[in-house]
C-alpha cells in the first residue's frame, strides 16, 4: 500500500510541476479573469468610440429625411448623431477617410419612400449600419402608413409585437427566465466537462505510453503490481484534475463576485453568471469525477497496449469519438432537454456525465432518476476497472508496434500467465 501512495504522489507532483500543465493552468486562469472583466473591457473600447465626438455625415435628400431619421435613431440604445454634410460626395468620402466622421449616408427619396447607401472605411462591423438600417426601415413603414391614411393609434397596434407568455403547469418546473439562465450556465459547464475529460484521459494514456517507451515500466513492474500502477495513475491524475477544477471555480467565483455590479446584462445574463447556483457546481464536480474515472480507466487500459507515444492517439481515437458524440447530443439537448432521446441516452454510462448533468441543470427531475444514473455509472466504472486491470496487467508487458484493439485479447491472455 505504501508503494501505491508513492506512485500516486509521484504522478500527481510530476504532472503538477510539468511546464505544459502550468502554462495551461495559467492561460485558463487569465481567460477566466478576462471573461469576468469582459463587459468592463468592451465598455472601455466601445465607450471610447461613442465619446470621441465622431458623427455620421448625411448627404442627399436631407431636408425631409434627416430629422425624422434622427428621431428614430434616438429611440435606439446608444443613439447615433446625424449631421447634414454641405459638401460633395467626394468630400464626404475624404472626411470619413480622415476620420472626421465614422461614416456617411447618402439618402434618397423616391415617391416619398426613403432609401440609403452607407459608406465607411470598413463595413465588417455592422453595428452602426444596422442601427441606421433599422431606423430607416421604421421611417419607411411610418411614411407608408401615413400615405395609406392609417391612424397612428391603429398603426401602433399593428406594428407592436404580440404579447406571448409561456407558463409551465408543473409546480416545480422552471420559468422561461430560469431556463434561459440555466441553458447558458449548463452550456459553459458542458464545455468545461468535455475538455477536462478529454484532456485528463489523454494525459493518462500518454503517461503510460511514455513510461513504456522509456522502459521505465520494466522497473515499475518489478517493484509494484500493474494494477496498483494503473489505479495510482488514475487517482493521481484525478486529484490533479480536481485541484485544477477547484482552482478555476474559486478564481472564477471570486472574479465574478468582485465585478458583480458590472456583470449585469449582456454575456453574463445570457450565460446565467449573474445568478450562480451552488447546486449546479456540486453536480458538476460529481459528474466530472465519475466521468473522469470512467474514461480514465479506458484510457489507462488502451495506453498500456502501445509501446510508442505516436500510437497512443490512434488507439484512443474511438474513446475520443464517444466523448464527442456525448457532447454533440448534449448540444442538441440544450434546446430539448426533456426529449425522449436525451432521456434514454442519459442512462447510458458513457453519455451519463454530460447528459444527466444537462437534465439536472435544466429540468426539475426526481432525485431517484439522478441516483439511478449515478448508480449505473458507478457499477460500470467498477466492471470496467476489473476488466481494465486485467488488460493493463498484460498490456504493460507487451512491446513492439501495437495500434489495434485486437491486442486486448493478447493482453488478457498475458495477464492470466502472471
Image (tube, grey):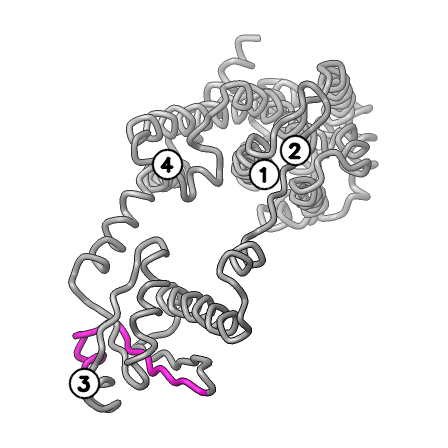
Residue drawn where x is 74% and y is 27% of the image: 388
Crowding at dot 2, Cα within 10 Å, few <14 / some 14-19 / many 20+, comes out as many
In whole angstroms, how far apart are the C-alphas of marks 2 and 1? 8 Å
Q: Is residue 181 visible?
A: yes
Check if residue 113 falls in the magenta segment. no
Residue at which label 4 appears: 264
Q: Nearer the viewer, mark 1 or mark 4?
A: 4
Q: Which class describes the residues within 10 Å of circle 1: few (<14), some (14-19), or many (20+)?
A: some
Secondary structure at numbered mark 4: loop
Question: Seen in the image, is 412 located left or right of residue 186?
Answer: right
Residue 344, placed above or below residue 3? below
Disc 1, SS: helix
Query: Could you say whether the residue bearing mark 2 is in a helix, strand or loop?
Result: helix
Span highlighted in magenta in the image: 95-110
Mark 4 or mark 2, which is nearer the start of the sequence? 4
Q: Nearer the viewer, mark 2 or mark 3?
A: 3
Amino acid at each position: 500500500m505504501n508503494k501505491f501512495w508513492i506512485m500516486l504522489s509521484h504522478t500527481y507532483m510530476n504532472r503538477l510541476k510539468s511546464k505544459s500543465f502550468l502554462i495551461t493552468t495559467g492561460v485558463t486562469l487569465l481567460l477566466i479573469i478576462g471573461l469576468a472583466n469582459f463587459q468592463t473591457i468592451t465598455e472601455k473600447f466601445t465607450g471610447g468610440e461613442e465619446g470621441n465626438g465622431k458623427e455620421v455625415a448625411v448627404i442627399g435628400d436631407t431636408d425631409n429625411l434627416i430629422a425624422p431619421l434622427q428621431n428614430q435613431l434616438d429611440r435606439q440604445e446608444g443613439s447615433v448623431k446625424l449631421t447634414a454634410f454641405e459638401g460633395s460626395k467626394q468630400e464626404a468620402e475624404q472626411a470619413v477617410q480622415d476620420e472626421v466622421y465614422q461614416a456617411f449616408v447618402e439618402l434618397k427619396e423616391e415617391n416619398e419612400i426613403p432609401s440609403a447607401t452607407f459608406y465607411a472605411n470598413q463595413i465588417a462591423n455592422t453595428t452602426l449600419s444596422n442601427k441606421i438600417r433599422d431606423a430607416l426601415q421604421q421611417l419607411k413603414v411610418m411614411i407608408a402608413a401615413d400615405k395609406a391614411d392609417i391612424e397612428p393609434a391603429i398603426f401602433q397596434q399593428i406594428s407592436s409585437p404580440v404579447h406571448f407568455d409561456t407558463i409551465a403547469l408543473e409546480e416545480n418546473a422552471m420559468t422561461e427566465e430560469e431556463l434561459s439562465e440555466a441553458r447558458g450556465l449548463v452550456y459553459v459547464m458542458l464545455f468545461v466537462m468535455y475538455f477536462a475529460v478529454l484532456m485528463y484521459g489523454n494525459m493518462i494514456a500518454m503517461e503510460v505510453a511514455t513510461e513504456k517507451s522509456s522502459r521505465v515500466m520494466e522497473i515499475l513492474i518489478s517493484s509494484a503490481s500493474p494494477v496498483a500502477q494503473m489505479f495510482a495513475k488514475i487517482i493521481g491524475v484525478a486529484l490533479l484534475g480536481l485541484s485544477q477544477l477547484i482552482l478555476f471555480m474559486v478564481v472564477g467565483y471570486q472574479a465574478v463576485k468582485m465585478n458583480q455590479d458590472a456583470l449585469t446584462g449582456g454575456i453574463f445574463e445570457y450565460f446565467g453568471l449573474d445568478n450562480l447556483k451552488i447546486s449546479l457546481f456540486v453536480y458538476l464536480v460529481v459528474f466530472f469525477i465519475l466521468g473522469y474515472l470512467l474514461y480514465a480507466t479506458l484510457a489507462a487500459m488502451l495506453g498500456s497496449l502501445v509501446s510508442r507515444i505516436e500510437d497512443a492517439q490512434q488507439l484512443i481515437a474511438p474513446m475520443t469519438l464517444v466523448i464527442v458524440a456525448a457532447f454533440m447530443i448534449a448540444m442538441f439537448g440544450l434546446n430539448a432537454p426533456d426529449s425522449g432521446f436525451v432521456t434514454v441516452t442519459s442512462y447510458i454510462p458513457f453519455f451519463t456525465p454530460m447528459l444527466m448533468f444537462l437534465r439536472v441543470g435544466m429540468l426539475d427531475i426526481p432525485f431517484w432518476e439522478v441516483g439511478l444514473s449515478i448508480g449505473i455509472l458507478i457499477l460500470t466504472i467498477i466492471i470496467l476497472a476489473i476488466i481494465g486491470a486485467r488488460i493493463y496487467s498484460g498490456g504493460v508487458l507487451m512491446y513492439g508496434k501495437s495500434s489495434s484493439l485486437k491486442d486486448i485479447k493478447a493482453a488478457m491472455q498475458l495477464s492470466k500467465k502472471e
